[in-house]
Image (tube, rainbow, N blue to C red):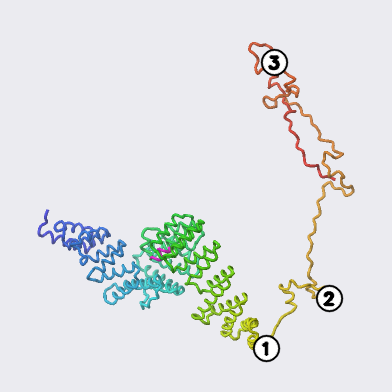
């Protein structure tokens, strides 16, 4: 039924009143009536979109916008469409919608900054908020400064860029917390921890004074600060204090799943491969709904890596492989997921599969030093020294590090390839001479190079290193002595010329105790001279006071209880008891006949009664029917128990009693 002419203004008035009072449910019903009259009314459709957004129905609002594209263009509802996409976590779509909107209003710029922050484009986000602070004049400057400092802190934390100072006063706990995160991102852990303490005090002070803030809300706000404080303590090595703070946050179960997931993940990292049961419980908190929207990409990567490692340690290979596959799809150039998969194959004794996975990754990412190092390690573990050494030498990133040079020289020496080992040393010394001359690493490397060449009879090559070292430090007499020793085998005149720089013998003071040197541990193979009796008296008292090593005394044997010292031992004691002259045998005892106490069916007759050859040849099992003759067989109950047949054979004892 069509509405009257005066009904439309009344309905619009109701919509306006509901919008002012916040009764969007009633306003939506009124707008539905208006749209029945004019379904393409732009204002009514726009109002309906706003009502749906206010009620949290972002999906329905977006569907309405996408279904009325001819009426609701991007210029009309660009902000509402981008906001719905933002709330539905469709950040890329929201960014495209904002960029397609012609009129960049202040609220659209605010949303643009939020979308850039969620997309981790912190530099562009920083520029947007700086522009807003310059060109806007309203009551939201404090929120903009907070968002600006958050983007500034994220730039330092996640992009490894040292941003410029903002010069914003830290008068709120949010600003103080963001400043602390900036310091932590710059590696200033101690200063960042002090700033976090200040942020905690400001948070307690500001929220405690507000009567509308409940204790649960206060703990939710403090949980973010406590997790960051625990992270700093963990990085500084105070693991017990960090674990206590993490456990406190997990026990409190804040409403924000972000800090809860971070605390649970970091507890797992502190447990390592111990306390697996607790780690399995904690890692489940990182899988809660909405966690991925609260964590940055680096945080998500760390959480999933820890989940994969935990699955590997708990022998859940299928789950570990699935997590690694997801990580490789999200981060195709990251070597850590490949290393986790390699470790899994290594634990399962599948060395060929492990090498194949590493080699496939190296073919796609030629500059992966970590993966090449893992390939070299597997080759060396399998005994392929030549292949492992060549792979190590091909890693340009650590080619001239002291540890890598030392490993290569050791491996080439083990393969008896001294020439290549010397070549490695020469390349390293040349690089340090060009890039870091005079550094302690360069001087140490020169010394080791010279010593190695001298040990392998390459004095002609060691001379150049020793001369370079002596030029660096002319006061080093040890280097000069090595140089003279090397020249003595090559050029005697040069050695004699250099010997002039040695100090005179008068200047050398040797405070050596000859007696102590002779008695030292290194002189154990000296021949001892015979000491005469007169010389023994002149020896020091301490040496005479040395006791000889006592010999162990033999224990006296135990004597029998019947031992008589007046009588000698029994001469027949070594014979068995039965073979001795005084053995009379065992005493036989006559047992009374026990009638009726034997087993049922036993007989008491002698052996003649039981002998079948002396009795009836074949007695019938039962008498023939009609026969009245009495049987000679005694009934079983009248028989006496037989003792002769059941008598057990006496056990023979081993030997007799050992008497005297």
Magenta stretch encompasses residue 432: no
Query: Mark 2 vs mark 1: which is more N-terminal?
Result: 1
Report, in whole angstroms, how far the alpha carbon at label 3 lies from the one at label 2.
Answer: 114 Å
Residue depicted at 52% across the width and 66% down the height: 388
Tell me: 124 left or right of 449: left
Residue depicted at 54% across the width and 61% down the height: 382
* Residue 248 visible from this viewpoint: no
Residue range corresponding to the magenta coloring: 297-302
| Secondary structure beneath label 2 | helix
Q: Quadrant of the C terminus?
A: top right
Residue depicted at 70% across the width and 82% down the height: 511
**Nearer to us: label 3 or label 2:** 2
On screen, residue 478 above or below 308? below
Is most of the magenta stretch helix, strand or loop?
helix
**Nearer to us: label 2 or label 1:** 1
Name the mark on residue 130.
none
Name the mark on residue 631.
3
Pinpoint residue 646: horizontal percent, then vertical percent.
Answer: 72, 30
Tell me: 443 left or right of 72: right
Count of marks placed on residues:
3
Pinpoint residue 476: horizontal percent, then vertical percent.
Answer: 61, 84
| Neighbours of disc 1 within 10 Å: few (<14), some (14-19), many (20+) | few
Magenta stretch encompasses residue 299: yes
Question: Quarter of the image holding residue 418?
Answer: bottom right
Give 534 or 40, whichever is nearer the viewer.
534
On screen, residue 317 above or below 194? above
On screen, residue 266 above or below 630? below
Residue at the spot of label 2: 535
Pinpoint residue 84: horizontal percent, then vertical percent.
Answer: 27, 62
Residue at the spot of label 1: 504
């Amino acid at each position: 039924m069509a509405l009257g002419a005066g009904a439309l203004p009344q309905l619009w008035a109701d919509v306006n009143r509901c919008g002012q009072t916040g009764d969007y449910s009633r306003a939506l019903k009124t707008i539905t009536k208006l749209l029945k009259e004019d379904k393409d009314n732009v204002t009514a459709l726009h109002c309906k979109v706003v009502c749906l957004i206010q009620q949290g129905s972002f999906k329905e609002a977006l569907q309405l916008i996408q279904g009325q594209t001819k009426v609701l263009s991007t210029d009309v509802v660009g902000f509402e469409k981008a906001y719905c996409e933002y709330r539905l976590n469709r950040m890329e779509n929201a960014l495209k919608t904002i960029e397609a909107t012609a009129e960049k209003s202040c609220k659209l710029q605010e949303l643009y900054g939020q979308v850039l922050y969620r997309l981790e484009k912190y530099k562009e986000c920083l520029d947007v908020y700086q522009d807003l602070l310059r060109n806007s004049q309203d009551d939201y400057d404090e929120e903009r400064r907070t968002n600006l400092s958050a983007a500034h802190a994220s730039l330092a934390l996640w992009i490894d860029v040292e941003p410029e100072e903002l010069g914003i006063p830290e008068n709120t706990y949010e600003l103080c917390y963001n400043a602390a995160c900036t310091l932590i991102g710059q590696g200033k852990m101690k200063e960042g921890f002090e700033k976090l303490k200040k942020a905690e005090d400001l948070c307690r002070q500001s929220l405690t004074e507000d009567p509308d803030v409940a204790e649960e809300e206060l703990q939710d706000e403090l949980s973010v600060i406590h997790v960051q404080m625990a992270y700093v303590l963990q990085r500084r090595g105070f693991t017990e204090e960090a674990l206590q703070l993490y456990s406190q946050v997990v026990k409190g179960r804040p409403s924000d799943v972000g800090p809860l997931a971070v605390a649970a993940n970091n507890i797992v990292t502190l447990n390592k491969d111990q306390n697996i049961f607790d780690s399995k419980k904690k890692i489940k908190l990182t899988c809660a709904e909405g966690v991925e929207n609260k964590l940055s990409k680096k945080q998500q990567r760390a959480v999933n890596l820890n989940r994969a490692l935990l699955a590997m340690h708990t022998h859940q290979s299928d789950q570990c492989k699935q997590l690694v596959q997801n990580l490789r799809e999200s981060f195709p150039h990251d070597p850590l997921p490949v290393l986790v998969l390699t470790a899994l194959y290594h634990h399962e004794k599948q060395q060929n599969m492990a090498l194949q996975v590493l080699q496939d990754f190296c073919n796609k990412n030629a500059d992966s030093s970590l993966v090449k190092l893992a390939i070299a390690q597997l080759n060396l573990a399998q005994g392929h020294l030549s292949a492992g050494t060549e792979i190590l030498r091909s890693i340009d990133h650590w080619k001239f590090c002291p540890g890598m040079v030392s490993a290569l020289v050791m491996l080439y020496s083990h393969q008896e390839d001294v020439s290549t080992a010397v070549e490695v040393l020469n390349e390293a010394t040349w690089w340090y001479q060009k890039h870091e001359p005079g550094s302690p690493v360069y001087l140490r490397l020169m010394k080791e190079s010279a010593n190695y060449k001298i040990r392998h009879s390459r004095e002609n090559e060691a001379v150049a290193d020793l001369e370079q070292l002596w030029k660096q430090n002319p006061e080093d007499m040890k280097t000069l002595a090595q140089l003279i020793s090397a020249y003595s085998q090559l050029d005697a005149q040069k050695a004699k010329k250099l010997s002039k720089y040695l100090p005179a013998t008068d200047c050398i003071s040797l405070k050596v105790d000859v007696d102590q040197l002779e008695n030292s541990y290194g002189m154990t193979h000296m021949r001892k001279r015979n000491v005469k009796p007169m010389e023994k008296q002149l020896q020091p008292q301490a040496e005479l006071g040395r006791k000889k090593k006592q010999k162990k005394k033999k224990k006296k044997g135990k004597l029998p209880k019947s031992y008589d010292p007046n009588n000698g031992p029994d001469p027949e004691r070594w014979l068995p008891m039965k073979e001795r002259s005084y053995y009379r045998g065992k005493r036989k005892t006559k047992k009374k006949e026990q009638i009726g106490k034997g087993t049922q069916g036993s007989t008491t007759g002698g052996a003649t009664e039981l002998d079948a050859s002396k009795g009836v040849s074949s007695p019938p099992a039962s008498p023939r029917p009609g026969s009245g003759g009495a049987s000679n067989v005694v009934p079983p109950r009248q028989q006496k128990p037989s003792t002769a047949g059941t008598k057990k054979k006496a056990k023979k004892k081993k030997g007799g009693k050992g008497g005297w």
